[in-house]
Amino acid sequence: MKTIPVNTNPAYAVTIGPGLLRDCGARLKEVLPPCRIAVVTDSTVGPLYLEAVTESLKAAGFPVSAFTFPAGEGSKNFETLSDILEFLATEHLTRSDCLVALGGGVVGDMAGFAAACYLRGIRCVQLPTTLLSAVDSSVGGKTAIDLKAGKNLAGAFLQPAAVLCDTDCLRTLPPEVFAGGAAEAVKTGVLCDESLFALFEGGTLEADPAEVIARCVAYKAGVVERDEKEQGERKLLNLGHTVGHAIEKCSGYAIPHGHAVAAGLAIMARASARLGWMSPEGLRQNDAERICSTLRLTGLPVSTEYAPEALAEAALADKKRSGDAITIVVPKEIGHCELMNIPVSELLFVIGTGWEA
C-alpha cells in the first residue's frame, strides 16, 4: 500500500493498493465526518463495483444513494450534469454531505464538477477504476464537461477529500483501455523521468502498475502543489493535449482520450525534432523516434487521419490560448520539456511539421 500526500488547500492523500474499494467505507470514515454519500458511476463500472462500494460505505455507517449514467465521453455534457444535480437535490444532500466518483476519467470529471456546482460546493472523493484516471485525472482537482466548441471548456477546480486507487480494478480493463492510461504514464516519463519512460520502452509494462501510478501521482502532486490553478508550471501536464484534444473533437469524441494524447505527443515530439527545438542530447538519442516507437509498442497511435488544418482549427478553443497566443509544451529530451508561447497563427505550421498520415 502506498500513500502520497497532496499538500493543496485543503490537503488530501492518494492511497494506492489492492482491495481499497472493499475497504473504502472504513478508510473514508477516517477522513470524512458523519454524512450522507451519493455515489456517481457509469453503466460500465456500476455493474462491476457499485455493490461492493455501497456495501462498504453502509457498513461504515454512511447512508448511501447512487446515480448511474451511460458510459462514454458522449455523456460528458450539460444534460448529464443537470441529471446529477437534480439527483443530488432529490436526495436532499446538504453542504455537509459528500459525492463519491466511482469510475474512470469521465466519471471523475462529471462527479467532480457536479460536486463543485451543487450548493456552491460539497466534498468529493475520487475512486478511480482505470489506469488513466489513477495516474492523472483523479488527482489535482480539475473537473469539467465538454462543449460543442471543444473538450473540457466548462469546469471548476475542486480538490478531492481523498483518492483511493484500487489496483485490483486494473485486472478488468480491456487492453485498449489499459493502453490509454499508459499514454498518460508515458507522457509523465517524457516530462520528468526517463527511468519511468524506460519502463514502457520495451512495449510491455514489466513494473508493478502500483509503482507506475505512485510515480506519476507523486510528480503531479508536486506540480499541483506549486501551481494549483494552472497559471504556469502546471501547463506542462498538457503535453500532447493541445493536439490530442483537437483529435478528440475532430472525431466526435469517438477516439479515446489516451489514444488521442498519444498521437498528439508523437506529433509534438516530431515537430520539436524537425524544428530544432530539441536539446543536443535529445537529438543525439533520437528521442522523437524513441517516443513514437514506445507509443507504437504500447498499442497506441502516433499519427492521425485528421489534416493539420482541421486540428489547428479545432485547437483554437484550447484552454491554453490567451488572446492571439497559445502555450504549447515542447519536448526537449525524454525527461525534460518546456513551455513555449507562440502566435496562434503559427500553430498550423507546428502541427503540420510534426504531422504524419
Image (cartoon, grey):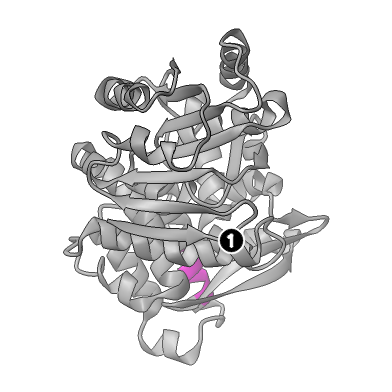
Q: Is residue 171 left or right of residue 97?
A: left
- Residue 330 placement (x, y as % from top left): 56, 71
Please tell me which residue lies in front, 221 or 2.
Answer: 2
Q: Which residue is mark 1?
A: 224
Please tell me which residue lies in front, 230 or 77.
Answer: 230
Q: Residue at x 37, y 26 (%)?
A: 57
Q: Quadrant of residue 169?
A: top left
Region of the chain picked out in magenta, as a range: 266-272
Kind of residue indicated by mark 1:
Val
Please tell me which residue lies in front, 198 or 341.
Answer: 198
- Residue 347 placement (x, y as % from top left): 66, 60
- Residue 262 placement (x, y as % from top left): 41, 55
Q: Quadrant of the C terminus?
A: bottom left
Q: Residue at x 42, y 25 (%)?
A: 41
Q: Is residue 174 left or right of residue 162?
A: left
Does the magenta stretch mainly form a helix, a strand or a loop? helix
Above or below, 109 relative to 293: above
Q: Is residue 202 visible?
A: yes
Residue at far right of view: 323
Above or below, 129 relative to 285: above
Q: Quadrant of residue 71?
A: top left
Q: Assign a secondary structure to mark 1.
A: helix
Q: Residue at x 36, y 28 (%)?
A: 60
Above or below, 144 relative to 98: below
Q: Quadrant of residue 48?
A: top left
- Residue 188 placement (x, y as % from top left): 43, 65
Residue 15 lies in the magenta-colored region: no
Q: Quadrant of the N terminus?
A: bottom left
Q: Is residue 172 left or right of residue 65?
A: left
